[in-house]
Image (spheres, grey):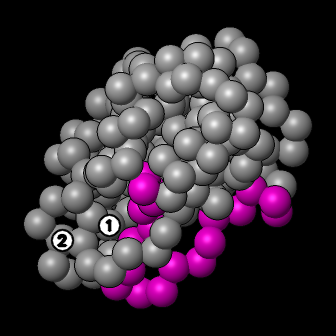
Amino acid sequence: MTVGDFSIDALYAALDAERRARGLSWAQLAGEINRPVGRPRPRAIAASTLSGMRGQRAIEGDGVLQQLRWLRRTPESFVPGLADGDGAAFALPDVPPNRILRFDTRAIYAALDARRRERGLTWTQAAVEIGGVSAAGLTRYARGGRTGFPQVMHIALWLGRPAASLTRVAIGSPTFEV
């Protein structure tokens, strides 16, 4: 595994270890992760999403942010080979009650486009340098929407920015996979 490959299996292991240490079922874990968001939350993180993520190649980014907040860990702490991945420079921002931390895909697009232009790259060349993403996937960020792991970590590392700097605090309920 190279630097930039966010380890979904390591995230799963950390969640499972903490869940077991606290004596929680997967459903109770999902309830704790979803609790800070408040109501309404018609598409909260499901227990099956949490228990089924081991072995997955990609997972939805906004849901991972909530899991990381519950663990009090940074996205970078799950990137093997990245020095000081759990350091203060990578800390996720505090989020007020009834708010949710989400990736700001339009801002990600703007940062990608600025860096791409600065370096005189096409979208295809940028995608090749970033790795794990396609040119079409990068340009789709212009419309907003969602992103996932490990792709967003490849982007953050290519931009030379903490993943936390690519987030925003949003109102209301999450819209992750259930």
In primary-sequence order, the first of circles 2 and 1 is 1
The picture quadrant where one finds residue 78 is top right
Is 141 or 75 nearer to us in this picture? 141
Q: Residue 41 got which mark? A: 2
At 18% across and 71% down in the image, what residue appears? Answer: 41
Is 81 or 160 nearer to us in this picture? 160
Residue 91 in the image: state x and y as whole percent.
71, 62
Residue 1 in the image: state x and y as whole percent.
68, 12
At 51% across and 25% down in the image, what residue appears? Answer: 123
At 68% across and 28% down in the image, what residue appears? Answer: 120
CA distance separating discs 2 and 1: 8 Å
- Amino acid bearing label 2: Arg
Magenta residue span: 88-106
Q: Is residue 96 magenta?
A: yes
Q: Residue at the bottom extreme? A: 97
Judge from the rendering whether residue 42 lies leftward or rightward of residue 111; answer left or right. left
Pointers 2 and 1 in contact (C-beta within 8 Å): yes
Q: Which residue in the structure is indicated by mark 1?
A: 34
